[in-house]
Amino acid sequence: MVEVQEVFVEPPKKKRNKKKILLITLGLLILIAAALAIFANAYINKSLAQVEGTIELAMLENEVTVITDKNGVPHIKAENEHDLFIAQGYIQAQSRMFQMELSRRQASGTLSEVVGEAAIDQDKYFRTLGLRRSAEMSYEIYSDEAKQVLQWFADGVNAYIKLAQDEGSLPIEFKLIGSEPGEWTPLDSLTIGKYMAFDLGGHWEQQAFNYYALTNFDEQKAYELFPKYPETKPTIIGEDEIDVASSFNQAVIPHAFNGSNNWVVSGDKTKSGMPLLADDPHLGLATPSIWYQMQLETPEIEVSGVIFAGVPGIILGHNTDIAWGVTNTGPDVQQLYLEKRNPDNANEFLYEGEWEKAQIIDEPIKVKDGETIDYQVVETRHGPIISDFANEEAKDTAMSLRWTALEPTTELEAILEINKASNWNEFEKGLEKFLSPAQNFVFAAKDGTIAYKANGNIPIYEDGDDALLPLEGWEKENDWNGYIPFDELPTVINPEKGFIATANNKIVGDNYPYHISNVWAQPYRYERIAEVLAAGDDFTIEDMQNLQMDQTDLQAREFVPIFAETLKDEKLSADEGRALDLLTNWDFVDNVDAAQPLIFQQWMDEIESILYKEIPEDVMDLFGSRGQTTNNILRSGDDSIWIQENGGMEQVLLTSLKNTLDDLTEAYGEELSAWQWGDYHQVQFPHPLSNVSPILAFFFNNEDPTPVGGSSVTPMAASYDSESGIVDHGASWRFVIDTSEMEKSYHIVGPGQAGHFKSDWYHNQMDDWVEGDYHMTVMDENEGMKLTLKP
C-alpha cells in the first residue's frame, strides 16, 4: 500500500487580504465622495431662487403673484406699491444677494471686512471719495414717499436674508468668503446708485494726466496730448509739484470705455408707422450681469425693463405709453483743485487769503483677520483731498476733488416718476430730479413723439479750457458758477431728419452757450449709426437689432487708406506687403473670422506703444482721451512732435507694423490669411470669485472664452484688454421696442438673469450676446413658473 502524503499549501492570506482591504477602502471612499457630492449638490441647490410654490412674508398686505418667464424674467403683480416694492426687494435678493452684498461693500469701502488686506487700498479710496456720505446727504432731501419705497424694498431684502439664514440657504459664495450679509438699509440702495455715477465717471483723471504732461514735457508737446488744444493756455503752479504717478497709482479708475449707444426713429421712417427705440449701455461684462430685468405691476403702474441689483424701480425700459434709454453724456462734472496747505497746520487750506479749517472725517476700516485701521478723510470746501489717499500729507500742495455726485441728488425720485409718465412732458418733469450722472436720454411714445435731452447737473465754466487742468483752489474765481439751467440743457423733440442718436459723441456745436466737455468718445460708433438711420425709411425691430450688432469699423475705414498711402513707396517685406494687401481689400467689418481686424487693431495698439513709451504705465491709466488723442496725432502726421521724435510718420508705421506682424506670427503662425480676430478677441463674463482659484473659475465661469466680433469703435461694442484679448466691456444689456406694440420688448441680458451657477438662467444668454439672438418679453405674461407671496 502506497501511503499518500497530504501536502497542504497555505494560501497567500496577506496579499489577498490587502487586496480586499484596498477594494473595500476604495469602495468606501467612492461612497463617501458620492455622499459628499450629493450633500454638496443638495446644499448648493438650497440657495437656488424659489420660482414656484408659496412663500409667506408677514409684512405683505395682500398676495403678490410672481410669474417667472422662460428667460428668467420675473413679472411681479401686486395690489399696491407697498407690496410691490417689498416683493421686488425679495425677488432681487434671492437671485442676486451676493452681488448686492459686494456692490454695497465696494461702494461703501467695507470690502476689507470680508476680503482682508487685499482690499484695504480700494476701501481707502472709496472712503476718501465718500459715496456713502453722499448717499446719507441725499437721503435727507428725498420725499417721504421715496423714503418709504426705499424702506419697503429694504424690508423685502431683509425678509429674504432672515429666511435664508434660518434655512441655511444663503448662496455658496457667502460660505466661501466666511461671511453673511447684514441688514439691508435704504442707504445701501442709494450708495449703489452713487457707485453707478462713479462708474460713469467724469474727467478728473484726465486733468491729472494733463497736469503730468505739462510738468514733464515741453509745452507744445504736452498740449498735443490734451483732448482739446487750449485756446487760452491754462496755468499750473510751478512750485511743490504733485507727483501724479505716485499720488494716484492706487486709485480706482472707471473704464474709459464706459459709454453706450441709443437712438430713436420716428414713425415716418419705420414699417409700423410708429417710433422705434434702441438702447445698449456699455459697461463691465461680468457674472452676474450688472442689470436685472423685471416687470412691475400694480393698478397704478405697469413698467418693464432693467434695474441695478439692490435698487428699487425700473431705471431703463418702458411702460404702456412710453419707452426710454440712456447713454453717458460724459460732461466735465469732476474738477481737481490744487490746495495750498498751511505749513503750520496740515488741516488748514488757503482760500481768498485766509486759512480755512478742513473737515476731518473718521473712517475706521475693519480688516478681516487684521487690526482696524484708523483712517481719516480731509475735506476742503471743494471736496475730499484725494492726493492724501496716497500718503502725500507732507506736501504743501494737495489735490481735492469737486464732483456733482458727491452732492445731495435725487435719482430714485426721478426713476419713480418716469416709471409712471405717460408722455414727454411728464417724463421731462421727472428728469428734473435726475441729477447725477448726467445722461443722454432718448424717448419714444405711442403718441408718436420722439425726443432727446442731455440731462443732469452740468457745471458752468466761464472758459471750457479751465476744465482741462486742476484749478487753483485758493482763488474764488475758479469755483463753479452753478449748473446749466434745466430748460437750457440740450434738447431735441421730433427733428425733421426723423431720428436722434447718441454714442457718447460730441452732442452740441460751438454755438451752444455753455461748455459741456473736452473729452468725447471717438465719433465712429455714432457716425455708423447715423449712416444707417439716414439711409433707410422702412425700419423694423430686426433692423434695430442688426444695427446694435453692426461690426463696421469706421476707424479702420479712415486710417487704412492713410497708412497705405504713407507706405506706398516704402520697401516692405513679403509679410508686410501681404498685410497691407489684406487691409486695403477689407470690407472694414470686424468679423470674428477675419484676419484684418486682428492686424489693424494690434497695429493701432503698437502705434500707441511707440508714441507714448515715455509715459509711465500707471500714468497711462489716467489718459482717458488716449484714443481721441492718438487719432489727432496720426491725422497730423509729421506735423506732430510725437511723430517727429519717433522718426516721422513712415518710420512709426513701419516699426509698428513690423512689431505687430512679428507678435502675431509668433502667436498664430506664419500664414496671415489664416489668422482670425476671434483667436484673440473673446468674451467670458467672469465671476468675481473666479480669480481666487482654478476650481472656483471652473464652476463660476462655467465656459471657456467665446470668440466674438466687433471692437471698441463698432456699434456692436466689444472693448478688450490688450494683454489678453478678453472682451471686458460692451453692451451689458440690449433693448429694442416698437411703440406700435408697447406690450412687447426685445432684450439680451448678458450672460443671463441668475446669479446662481446651478440656475438654468446663469449663462443661458452668453451665446445670445455673441450672436445677437434677442428674447421677447411681454407685459401680460401668463406662461411661466408661478410663485405666490402670501401675508
Image: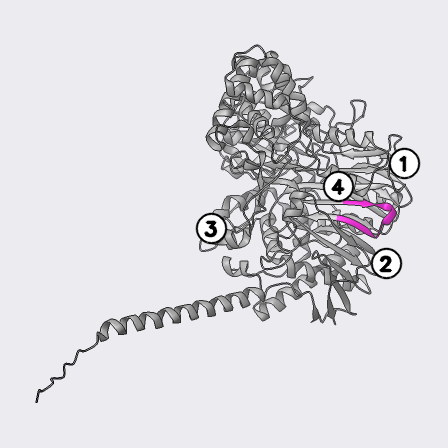
Q: Above or below — where is 55 with respect to 420?
A: below
User: Which is more N-terminal, label 2 or label 1?
Assistant: 1
Q: Above or below — where is 334 with respect to 151?
A: above
Is 742 within the magenta? yes
**Residue 680 falls in which quadrant of the image?**
top right
Say what amino acid the circle numbered 2 marks. Answer: Glu
Say what amino acid the circle numbered 1 marks. Answer: Asp
Q: Dot 2 lies on which element? A: loop
Q: Position of residue 23 (x, y in %)?
A: 34, 70
User: Which is more N-terminal, label 3 or label 2?
Assistant: 2
Say what amino acid the circle numbered 4 marks. Answer: Gln
Q: Which residue is mark 2?
A: 300
- Marks 2,4: beta carbons within 8 A: no
Q: Above or below — where is 692 with respect to 247?
A: below
Q: Which residues are magenta?
A: 736-746
Q: Position of residue 196 (x, y in %)?
A: 67, 44
Q: Which residue is mark 1?
A: 268
Q: Which mark is residue 545?
A: 4
